[in-house]
Image (cartoon, grey):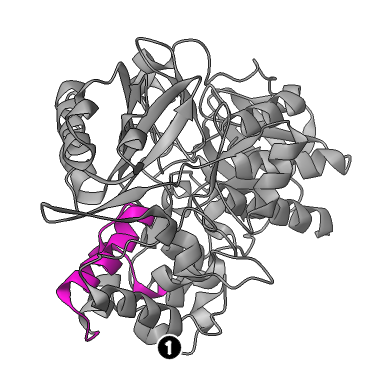
Amino acid sequence: MLTVSSLSRRRLLGGAAIGAAGLALGSRFVGSGVASAASGGSIGAQTYDTVVVGGGLSGLSAAKKLAQAGRSVVVLEARERAGGRVHNISTPKLGVTLDAGAEFIGPTQTHIAALAQEYGVVSLPTYNEGESVYWNSGRRSTMPAALGLPIDPASPEAALALSQLELEPLLGFPVGEPWKHRDAEYLDSVTWQQWLESRTISPTARMLLSLASSAALSVEANELSALYFFNYVASAGDETNPGSLIRLLSTAGGAQERLFVGGAALIPLRMANELAERVVYNAPVRSINWTDEVVTVVTDSGVVKAKKVIVAMSPAISGGIDYGSGLTPARAGLHAGYRMGAISKFAAVYREPFWRKKGMSGQVIGNGEPIDVCFENYAEGNHVLMGFISADSMRRLDQAPDEQITAECTQNFVDYFGPEARDHVDHGIFKWDLEPWSQGGPVAVSRPGTLTRYGTALRAPVGPVHWAGTETSDYWTGYMDGAVRSGYRAAKEVLGAR
């Protein structure tokens, strides 16, 4: 899942020719340099072993491995900061540091956990005591936070539906290669909504399962193929622990189990500082061309030559680069078949966690408007309620003023937690849809027909061009761990290439 005042959850990472470099929409919230990286390096005249396009977690992870192997490498980042979809911001009044992008970590996410330990970034458990709120079409009910799943207490069919989902197509799922599933053609011919409508489950259970796409992916159930969704669920594990919806949606024991002190962006910022002169900012890539001898990468900051390129970007936006030497039809089809989710975060800062005194966890799931999912966050001695605005709700508010979004989201918190929610001392909003080097988030999803036709191109190199980004990961696609995995995999490809 994913964060705040110029906040986030996910159509993200940059480097393509898609707009001007990108913090302007949230500049009034950035403040004290929380989001800034080191000044970075500059483009040299040498021919590098590898150019990495994109300075998010995937690109930095690839560059880290290549540098450790003694290869010359330069990272070209379109923004003036590192981190991509992992981004800290400051609130406008108090300067409270908030996660604007990816923030949570849970079991089996060992790659991001190892980086956090290496760079001295500690985590705390997400508050998970008391009762959580379940909101269904204006009706509020509660469930024990320890239950860990969005099950309507009044609907036994919901638990049955969740069990049914775990037992059907996920059994023996070919994680990372969904086009190899025994029912791939059918599952990729229908949307997640159509698949749900074909099941004999109650409307309430169907609504809960459709929430899984908006809560985790920030798209409506009719915007992605069923095959993509099943692969997304199956990826919520590792080589020895099968993915499951329970791990994907749960707090304790799940993907939302812990959050990082000081914000998750400390990890990529410290990685970028370590890479130092190897990272060039404000360098959006416009074109990539190659011959048998050399790759030429054209940016706004100059021309770079290399032997190999790793494009560490979402497939939904990496098509914005001009590949003058030509992509394979499958790779071009992949770019056209992916789209970003629509996401924003709203965070309200409070002096006291009043919801705890009322025996509440601060967690919400349901079909509320505009906030459908909520968690308690911590920030520098303050307590924070953070809500995601996703899919259609986000698209409706993309051009809305801050005052309207604040009023609507505050009313959500009042409905969920009581009138005390009006008394926040600061707040933050970050619209990832309008961030030009991300264009939404938290992850790109595929339309029906994309994976079975073009899925094999997701990681397949095109000439000297290799592909990274969380969408290309086998496990934890869409998450920080998946981004790191993808960077390591792309670096291994380059190091092993002739």
Residue sitting nearer the eye, 446 or 409: 409
- Main SS class of the magenta portion in the image: helix
Relative vertical location of residue 356 with respect to residue 329 in this rendering, above or below = above
Image-based side of 454 in relation to 224, left or right: right
User: Does the magenta-highlighted stretch encompass residue 353?
Assistant: no
- Classify residue 152 by image quadrant: bottom left
Residue at x 38% of width, y 62% of height:
149
Q: Quarter of the image for the C terminus: give it.
A: bottom right
Front position in the image: 173 or 309: 173
Instruction: Give the residue furthest to the right.
Output: 70
Q: Residue furthest left?
A: 138
Q: Is residue 312 visible?
A: yes
Disc count in the image?
A: 1
Q: Please provide the residue range marked out in magenta.
A: 199-227
Would residue 162 be found to the left or right of residue 198 on screen?
right
How far across and down, in percent of the image, does residue 488 sit?
72, 52
Front in this rendered view, residue 174 or 121: 121
- Asked which quadrant contains residue 150, the reply is bottom left
Mark 1, residue position: 183
Q: Amino acid at mark 1?
A: Asp
Residue 468 visible in rendering: no
Q: Position of residue 447 (x, y in %)?
A: 33, 66
Q: Is residue 54 above or below residue 407?
A: below
Q: Please tell me whether residue 222 belongs to the stretch shown in magenta.
A: yes
**Are there few (<14), some (14-19), or many (20+) residues within 10 Å of tag 1?**
few
Q: How far across and down, in percent of the image, does residue 422 sit?
A: 20, 24
On the image, the x and y values in percent for residue 160 come to: 32, 80
Task: Assign a secondary structure to mark 1.
Answer: loop
Q: Quadrant of residue 428?
A: top left
Q: Residue at x 53, y 80 (%)?
A: 173
